[in-house]
Image: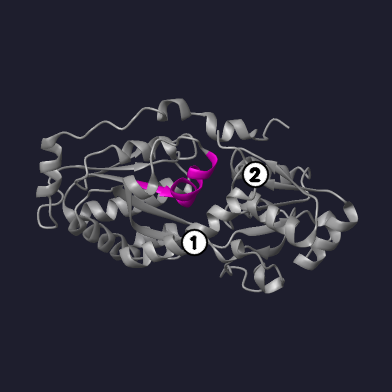
Amino acid sequence: MSAKLDRRHFVAAGTTALAMPFLARSASAQGTSQGTSQGTWPSRQVRMICSYPAGGQTDLLARAYGEFISKQVGKTVVIENKPGAAGAIGTAEVARAEPDGHTILCSISTTYIMNRVVMKNPGYDMDKDLTLVSVIPGAGLLLVANPKTGVKTLEDFVAFARKSGKVNFGTYSAGSSPHMTINELNKQYGLNIEPVHYRGEAPMWTGMLEGTLDAAMGSYTAAQSVLQSDRGTVFAVHSKKVDAIPAIKTLPEQGATSKFFTVSGFTGWAVPKATPQPVVDRLAELCVAANSDPKVKEVLATFVLEPAIGFKETNALYQRELPIWIESARSLGLEPA
């Protein structure tokens, strides 16, 4: 199938370019960052680097929040898309930037957490090179079955998988949340669910529309083409209830026991590690304040997302979810590339 994603493709693009060592910052740059404070930031145009392509969820969030921040601080916030290598290309650029609050990253938990597991050298060390500012907790991902399976609950799905012997289950990339969900379900129930990796959600849901998949997992918004055409039945949500479909139970509510089914992932903003704390705090405050902006609210509603949370809450969520993501990712047995 042409849409399938070989694992090599998951990490190959841009990996070589990321192998370069970090450039040492000049003494003058250090002086600039040390002199930056909440009162003087920003002193010029702000770059917000989105490490995923234009038009997607991460990009639309970056633009909505960036526009609000620009209005509040009286300086232009320019969104620059630097996609590639699961977000590592844009992230490495921010990690090398001046730590003065004028270069901000907008990315997702795959970039902040997963790349350290699936890449030998992503070009940055999240915990040494970057500071998380604010995040938007992830929405509940939908598990959707082909109607021909007759599956309407997790119990039905387990029974179908055992009877069939093999299930083709679509994911939007190797190492993704759906990939780890499949692995955890296989372990708990002794199933043989086969992940079919695609290059993103759109081609995966096309696979469901074409009837080539038994099941797939992804976002509520992206799944609408399948759900509205009655080509798929939602039988569970990953870890969080989805307001638009409140009757659908989470995996834990239906008996799944993996710790991975308690995490949600996130989209969020980060800055170079040495960025002064007053600037970090101000950015976090602006992200939270943006939640009340009409354009921001519209984008959040479109993707069924919760509002951005503050600096303290953000880093508590990160520390809580990090070990669970790492453990689940390593259990996939993928060799870093």
Residue 45 belongs to magenta span = no
N-terminal of the two: label 2 or label 1? 1
Distance CA(mark 2)–CA(mark 1): 20 Å
Q: Nearer the viewer, residue 128 or 159?
A: 128
Secondary structure at badge 2 equals loop
Which span is picked out in magenta? Answer: 105-118
Whether residue 113 appears in magenta in the rendering, the answer is yes
Q: Position of residue 43 (x, y in %)?
A: 12, 46
CA neighbours of label 2 inside 10 A, class few (<14), some (14 to 19), many (20+): few
Image quarter of residue 318: bottom left
What x and y, as percent, mark residue 251?
67, 67
> What secondary structure do most residues of the magenta stretch adopt?
helix
Residue bearing the label numbered 2:
333
Look at 23% across and 51% down and name the residue there. Answer: 70
The amino acid type found where label 2 is placed reads Gly
- Tell me if label 2 and label 1 are in contact, CB under 8 Å: no
Q: Is residue 337 above or below residue 237?
A: above
Q: Residue at x 36, y 37 (%)?
A: 92
- Decide which of 58, 38 is in the foreground and name it: 38
* Residue of label 1: 321
Determine the residue located farthest toward the right in the rendered image: 163
Q: Is residue 279 left or right of 245 when viewed as pictured?
A: left
- Which quarter of the rendered picture does the N terminus lie within? top right
**Residue at point 60%, 65% (across, down):** 259
Q: Position of residue 208 (x, y in %)?
A: 73, 47
On the picture, is 199 further left or further right than 61? right
Label 1 SS: helix
Q: Mark 1 belongs to which amino acid?
A: Glu
